[in-house]
Image (cartoon, rainbow, N blue to C red):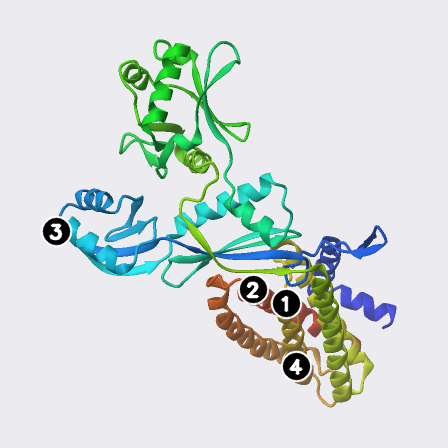
Amino acid sequence: MSDSKLMACLKHWQVALMIILLVASVIAIAPRFEDGKFTTNLQYGLDLQEGTWLQMEFKAEIVGFETDKPVDQFVSDLQKQLDTEMYLIDEGKLEIRSYFPRETLESAFAAAGGRLTSYEQGVSRETADDVKRILENKLNALGTKDARVNPLTGLSGVTHYIRVELAGVSLSQAKEIVGKQGKFEIRIHTTGNETEHVLYGETITSVGVPSHEPPGSTTWGVSFTLSEDGARKLQQGAIATGAVSNPDAHFLDMVLDGNVVYSAPLSGDLAAKLAIEPIRQLYASTGPGAAGLDAAKNLEIHLRAGALPVDVSVAGSGYVPAGMSDYFRLMCAIAFIAAAVAVGVVIYYRYREASIVLPMIGTNLTEIVILLGIATLIQQLDLAAIAALIAVMGTGIDQLVIITDEVLHEGKVPSPTLYKKRLVRALGIILISAFTVIIAMIPLALMDLSSLRGFALITIIGVVIGVAVTRPAYGEIIKEILSK
């Protein structure tokens, strides 16, 4: 391409935008040599790097019910029947945080004065998000790299499984990380910055979800219940340190693994009660508004000492050794190169003109590089994502062929007015095709089906980049190159 042709191409904003995105993507990918090895900022999934995956099933249920009793009274009676945590998540729907067969629940519901109308094993989205945050906090605290935690939610909104992927971690280590609890402790300030131990986390028998106290107020907090031994130790500690007589001067600290996660004085009402008797039911206030709610959610996790609010069982697991991941990466590279060469050969056979084939292949590869640049920010590359990249390359060439055949007449570029009309018509055809692909991929992108979700996201992003950036840019490039 001559310098004049190149400058003419760069004058079009579509071409300039494509080049800017290409440069930004190369910077984001950052190909380089480190320690004698070629590396990039691309993130790989477990298919392409050593690591372990665990898929865990929630041992809980989301159930629908009917009752003639007041709902609060019915839930209280049912809780006594089953002796487990449960929360009303919607009108006529309960989350029961222990596993019971349907037959057992039907008997318990009948005894409590209600009827079971639906039953689905799993948890609500809110509980699944809590589990995800707990696991991510654990993994971050342990310094685990390239960890992914993905709840797998069905169309009903019930989350049945959660999948954890850990790079560079053995299967036994992964199970230990997921099941490990932290060391939780409550201490009371004595004088200055000195504190005195009161109780450990094993005396906390249950933890509530973030709520307002009193009901209707704007202040958030978390309720929790102590065992009889824990309540007695709290009373003894409060009396011994003088907190019952001067609560404002004796803060109560909650400490997880040596880090203070909550610190506040005893309320005057609680101090007065502790002076008389042990108190089992406590409430830790975290403040009003969104900040108070976020603090309450984090405190709930800390009170559980990193334990999951719902029991889980390992439904599936796997380990990818380093040798296998290296082999997969090599095969993916070979497959991608082979696909690019095959596409180039077919295009050259069709047009027999380098001035058409080279811009077409260059535009197609530019689109892939831009897609990889975006992927460094939002998506790990696994086998399904690589398949999506190859699919995007194939559909991209198809659409560039549509543009080329539509705008050229007998191998020449028509007049500017006619060319514009033909290009708009070609882009219209491509837009409808792209819209169809996006609609087809949306269910996979929304269903949290692990690697299939990655395939859908890469495909959708690739189609959007093509329609918005590379197809219009190619239309301007081919016009400038072939025009006389």
Q: Is residue 140 above or below residue 234?
A: below
Report the Cα–Cα distance between label 1 and label 2: 8 Å
Q: What residue is disc 4 on?
A: 418
Rendering quarter of residue 239: top left
Q: Nearer the viewer, mark 1 or mark 4?
A: 1
Kindly identify the amino acid type of the residue bearing the numbered disc 2: Ser
Kindly identify the amino acid type of the residue bearing the numbered disc 1: Leu
Residue plotted at (43% across, 52% down): 312
Q: Are dots 1 and 4 in contact, CB under 8 Å?
A: no
Residue plotted at (80% across, 87% down): 352
Report the Cα–Cα distance between label 4 and label 3: 74 Å
Q: Are dots 2 and 3 in contact, CB under 8 Å?
A: no
Q: Is residue 433 above or below residue 93?
A: below
Q: Is residue 69 above or below residue 20?
A: above
Q: Are dots 1 and 2 in contact, CB under 8 Å?
A: yes
**Disc on res. 451:** 2
Q: What residue is disc 3 on?
A: 68
Badge 4: residue crowd in 10 Å (few <14, some 14–19, many ≥20): few
Of marks 2 and 3, which one's residue comes earlier in the chain?
A: 3
Looking at the rendered structure, the number of numbered marks drawn on it comes to 4
Residue 411 in view = no
**Disc on res. 383:** 1
